[in-house]
Image: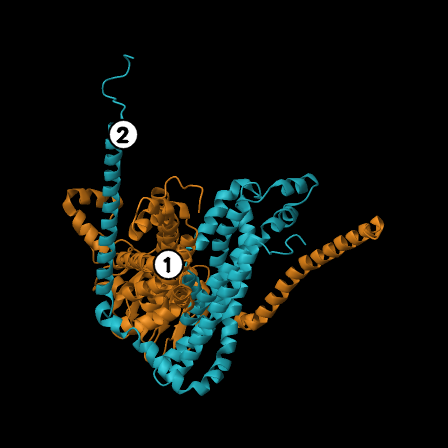
C-alpha cells in the first residue's frame, strides 16, 4: 500500500532498538533519582550532624553507655525493682487511661465527622468539603501543641493530654473511618430512609453495624499509638508515666533503678498492647474460624 | 425411625436458637454503650476533673487568646527621673528610638514637658512633671501624684468602680482601651492594638511602616536585598531562624524515615518466611524489630540524647531506630506476599541469587514499600515536631521555648500556623510523589 510512509519500518530490529533506548533512558532516570537521593541523604546527615550538640562519630561509641549504667544500677538493686514497679503502677494506669479515654472520645468524634464527610451519608451534603478540611486540620496539629497550651490554661495533669490526643485522634480516625464508609453499602440507609428514620437512626442502624469491625480495628491501632503519645506528653508535664520518668531521670545517677523500672513498665505495656491488638485485629479482619455467623 | 426428628420440635428449637441469639445481640448492643459510659464516668473522677475545673485559670486563657491576635504597647514613665519610653510588648527590641513615638503619643519636650496619650474612645492620659492624669469618658478625671509618700491618687466622687484597683502605693485602672498602673516608682500604660506587631520590619529598620507599594518600588530600584535582609533578620520574629527550624524538622523526618527504610530492607529479608528458611534467624530478626518498636520513641530519644547531645541528629536517629522496627515488620510482610512465579522464571533462565532479588522481588515490592515510606515521611514530620520539643531541635524547640515564656503567645500562634501548613505541604507532597512514582497502581494500597 502506498499510504505507508517509508519512515515507519515495521520490523523486529526497529522495535528492539526502541525498546533498548527506552530501557536505557529509564535506567538513566532511575540512576539520576538514586544519585539525588543519596546526595540528599548524605548532605542532610552532614547538616544534622553539624547542628547537633555532639557529633555522630564521637557519639555512636557511647550509645550503649547510658543503657549500661542504667542496667548496672538496676541489677545492683534488683531487689528494689518490684517495689518500684508497684510504686509507678498507678502512673502507668493513668497513662493507659489517658490513651483509652482519648481513643474512645476520638473514635466517637471521628465517627460522626467521617459520616458527615462521606457522600451518601452526609447530613448536609454541601458541607462535605468543610468537614473534610476540619479533619485535615485536626490531624495536622501535633498533640504537643495543644497539650502545652492547655497545660498553661488548665494546669498540669492528665486532662490536657487527654484533650490533646483526642483532638488529633478525631482527625486521624475520621480519615480512616471515612475510607471505611466509602465501602459500606447504602442500601440499608435507603431502606431506613423509606420508613422515615432520622439521620441518627439511619447512621446507627444502617451504617454502624456494617462498619463496626473495621472501626474497631482502626481504633485499636490508634490506641496503641496513643499510649506512646500519652507517655511522651507526660514527659512535657501532662502526668502519667512520662512525668514520673522525667522526674526519675532528673535525679540522675544513683536513682537510675527507678528509671529502669519505668522503662520496663513502659516497654512491657507497649509490647502487650501491640501483641493483643494485632491478634484481635487479625481475628476481626480474617474472621473467627468457627462461629463467624453465630 | 429415629433418623427423622419431629419437624415441629426442630422448628421450635430453631426458633429458640434465633430468639436466644437476638436476646444476646440486644444485650450486647445495650451493654457496650453502658460500659463505655461507665468507663468515662470512672475516668472523669480518676482524672480529677472537678478539681481541675477549680484550679483552671480562665485569666490565663484570656491572656492567651488576646495575645494571639493583638499586641500591647507599653508607655512607661520612670517617676523618679521623669523619663518616658515607648516599647512594643515592653521589649527592648521593640522599643521606639529616643524621642520618637507612635502617633497617639505626644511626647513632652523642653517647653511643654507633658506627655499626652490619646486613646480610642476619647480617653486622654497625661504624664506631667508632677502629676499623672487619666480622663476617662463617662467616669471622670483620675489624677495621681506619685512620690515617696505613695501613689497619692484622687478619684471623682462616689464609690470606686470594680475596674479600678487602688491602694496607698498602687493604682491600677483597666478599661477596654488600655491599662494604667501607677506605683511610687513607675507609671505604665498598656494599650492593646490588633494584629501581630512588627511582623515584617522592626522599628530600627528604615522600611518599618512603609506601604507595600512603596516597598515594591524600592525593591525594583535595587533595594530588594536590603529589604529582604531586614525582614529575614527581624529581631522580634526571627523569620530566618524559624525557616531554618522548619527545615530542620523536615530534615529529621527525612533522615529518620529513609534511613530506617535503608536499614530495615535487608533485615526484612531475614525476617520473611520465604527468604529465610532458618527459623532461628527469622525469629531473631523479628524479635529485633519488636524490640525497636517496643522501646518507645520517647525512650530512644532519651538514650540517644545521652550519647549525641541535643540537636536534630538525635531526633533523626530516634525516628530512624523506632521506624526500623515498624518498617522491618511491614516490609517482611510485604516480602512474604510476593509472587514466587517471577523468581522461578528468573531462576529458569539462570539468574544468580542477587539478580533474582533485583529483578524478581524488588520490582514487585517497590510500590508497596515506597507508599508506606511516604506515608511515614508525612506522619514523621509531625513526630519530629514532638521529638524536637524533647531533644531540642527544629520548630518543636522554638514552640516550647515560646510557650515557656508564657507571654509570647502571638509567636506560639505563628509557629502553630507554620507547623500546620508544613504538615499540609508534606501531606500534599508525599501524595503527589506517591502518585508520580507508583503509576498504574491507582487502585491498590
User: What residue lies at 47% left-to-right and 50% top-to-bottom?
Assistant: A134
**Contact flag, marks 2 and 1 (Cβ < 8 Å):** no
Question: According to the rendering, which colour does chain B have?
Answer: orange
In this rendering, the answer to whether B146 lies above or below B331 is below
Residue A223: mark in rendering? none
The chain holding disc 1 is B
Q: Measure the alpha-carbon separation of dots 2 and 1.
A: 39 Å
Chain displayed in cyan:
A
User: What residue lies at 28% left-to-right and 63% top-to-bottom?
Assistant: B87
Q: Which residue is mark 1?
A: B268
Q: Residues within 10 Å of mark 2 (few under 14, many from 20)?
A: few
Name the spot of residue A193 as percent of width and height, x first. Answer: 66, 41
Tell whether A266 sits left or right of A109.
left
Q: Which residue is mark 2?
A: A15
User: What residue lies at 35% left-to-right and 64% top-to-bottom?
Assistant: B321
Instruction: Say which of marks 2 and 1 sits in front.
Output: 2
Tell whether B31 sits left or right of A104.
right
Amino acid at each position: 500500500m502506498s499510504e505507508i510512509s517509508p519512515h515507519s519500518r515495521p520490523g523486529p530490529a526497529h522495535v528492539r532498538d526502541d525498546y533498548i533506548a527506552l530501557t536505557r533512558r529509564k535506567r538513566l532516570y532511575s540512576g539520576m533519582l538514586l544519585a539525588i537521593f543519596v546526595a540528599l541523604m548524605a548532605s542532610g546527615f552532614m547538616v544534622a550532624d553539624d547542628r547537633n550538640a555532639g557529633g555522630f562519630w564521637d557519639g555512636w561509641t557511647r550509645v550503649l553507655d547510658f543503657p549500661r549504667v542504667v542496667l548496672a544500677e538496676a541489677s545492683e538493686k534488683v531487689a528494689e525493682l518490684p517495689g518500684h514497679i508497684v510504686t509507678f503502677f498507678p502512673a502507668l494506669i493513668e497513662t493507659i487511661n489517658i490513651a483509652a479515654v482519648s481513643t474512645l472520645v476520638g473514635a466517637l468524634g471521628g465517627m460522626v465527622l467521617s459520616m458527615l464527610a462521606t457522600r451518601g451519608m452526609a447530613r448536609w451534603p454541601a458541607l462535605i468539603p468543610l468537614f473534610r478540611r476540619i479533619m485535615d486540620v485536626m490531624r495536622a496539629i501535633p498533640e504537643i501543641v495543644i497539650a502545652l497550651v492547655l497545660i498553661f490554661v488548665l494546669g498540669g495533669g492528665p486532662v490536657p493530654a487527654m484533650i490533646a490526643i483526642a483532638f488529633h485522634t478525631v482527625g486521624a480516625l475520621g480519615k480512616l473511618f471515612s475510607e471505611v464508609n466509602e465501602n459500606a453499602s447504602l442500601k440499608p440507609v435507603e431502606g431506613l430512609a423509606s420508613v422515615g428514620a432520622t439521620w441518627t437512626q439511619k447512621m446507627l442502624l444502617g451504617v454502624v453495624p456494617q462498619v463496626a469491625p473495621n472501626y474497631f480495628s482502626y481504633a485499636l491501632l490508634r490506641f496503641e499509638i496513643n499510649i506512646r503519645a500519652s507517655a511522651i506528653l507526660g514527659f512535657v508535664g501532662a502526668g502519667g508515666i512520662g512525668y514520673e520518668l522525667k522526674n526519675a531521670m532528673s535525679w540522675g545517677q544513683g536513682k537510675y533503678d527507678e528509671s529502669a523500672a519505668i522503662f520496663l513498665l513502659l516497654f512491657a505495656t507497649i509490647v502487650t498492647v501491640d501483641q493483643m491488638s494485632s491478634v484481635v485485629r487479625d481475628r476481626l479482619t480474617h474472621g473467627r474460624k468457627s462461629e463467624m455467623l453465630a | 425411625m429415629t433418623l427423622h426428628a419431629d419437624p415441629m420440635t426442630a422448628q421450635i428449637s430453631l426458633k429458640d436458637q434465633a430468639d436466644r441469639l437476638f436476646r444476646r445481640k440486644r444485650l450486647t448492643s445495650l451493654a457496650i454503650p453502658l460500659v463505655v459510659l461507665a468507663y468515662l464516668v470512672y475516668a472523669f473522677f480518676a482524672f480529677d476533673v472537678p478539681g481541675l475545673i477549680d484550679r483552671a485559670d480562665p485569666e490565663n486563657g484570656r491572656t492567651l487568646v488576646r495575645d494571639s491576635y493583638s499586641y500591647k504597647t507599653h508607655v512607661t514613665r520612670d517617676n523618679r527621673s521623669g523619663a518616658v519610653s515607648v516599647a512594643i510588648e515592653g521589649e527592648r527590641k521593640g522599643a521606639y528610638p529616643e524621642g520618637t513615638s507612635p502617633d497617639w503619643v505626644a511626647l513632652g519636650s523642653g517647653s511643654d514637658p507633658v506627655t499626652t496619650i490619646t486613646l480610642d474612645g476619647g480617653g486622654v492620659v497625661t504624664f506631667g512633671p508632677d502629676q499623672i492624669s487619666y480622663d476617662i469618658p463617662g467616669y471622670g478625671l483620675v489624677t495621681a501624684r506619685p512620690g515617696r509618700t505613695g501613689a497619692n491618687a484622687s478619684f471623682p466622687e462616689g464609690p470606686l468602680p470594680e475596674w479600678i484597683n487602688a491602694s496607698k502605693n498602687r493604682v491600677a485602672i483597666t478599661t477596654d482601651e488600655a491599662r494604667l498602673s501607677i506605683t511610687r516608682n513607675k507609671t505604665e500604660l498598656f494599650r492593646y492594638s490588633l494584629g501581630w506587631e512588627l511582623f515584617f520590619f522592626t522599628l530600627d529598620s528604615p522600611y518599618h511602616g512603609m506601604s507595600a507599594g512603596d516597598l515594591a518600588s524600592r525593591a525594583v530600584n535595587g533595594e530588594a536585598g536590603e529589604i529582604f535582609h531586614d525582614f529575614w533578620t527581624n529581631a522580634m520574629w526571627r523569620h530566618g531562624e524559624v525557616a531554618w527550624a522548619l527545615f530542620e524538622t523536615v530534615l529529621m523526618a527525612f533522615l529518620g524515615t529513609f534511613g530506617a527504610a535503608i536499614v530495615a530492607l535487608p533485615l526484612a529479608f531475614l525476617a520473611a518466611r520465604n527468604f529465610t528458611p532458618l527459623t532461628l534467624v527469622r525469629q531473631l530478626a523479628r524479635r529485633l524489630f519488636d524490640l525497636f518498636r517496643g522501646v518507645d520513641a520517647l525512650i530512644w530519644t532519651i538514650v540517644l540524647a545521652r550519647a549525641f547531645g541535643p540537636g536534630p541528629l538525635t531526633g533523626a536517629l530516634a525516628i530512624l531506630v523506632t521506624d526500623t522496627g515498624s518498617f522491618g515488620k511491614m516490609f517482611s510482610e510485604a516480602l512474604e506476599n510476593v509472587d514466587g512465579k517471577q523468581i522461578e522464571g528468573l531462576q529458569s533462565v539462570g539468574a544468580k541469587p542477587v539478580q533474582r532479588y533485583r529483578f524478581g522481588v524488588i520490582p514487585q515490592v517497590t510500590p508497596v514499600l515506597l507508599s508506606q515510606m511516604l506515608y511515614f515521611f508525612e506522619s514523621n514530620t509531625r513526630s519530629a515536631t514532638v521529638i524536637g520539643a524533647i531533644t531540642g531541635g527544629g520548630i518543636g524547640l522554638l514552640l516550647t521555648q515560646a510557650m515557656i515564656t508564657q507571654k509570647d503567645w502571638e509567636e506560639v500562634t505563628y509557629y502553630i500556623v507554620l507547623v500546620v501548613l508544613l504538615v499540609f505541604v508534606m501531606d500534599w507532597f508525599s501524595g503527589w510523589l506517591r502518585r508520580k512514582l507508583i503509576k498504574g497502581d491507582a487502585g491498590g494500597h
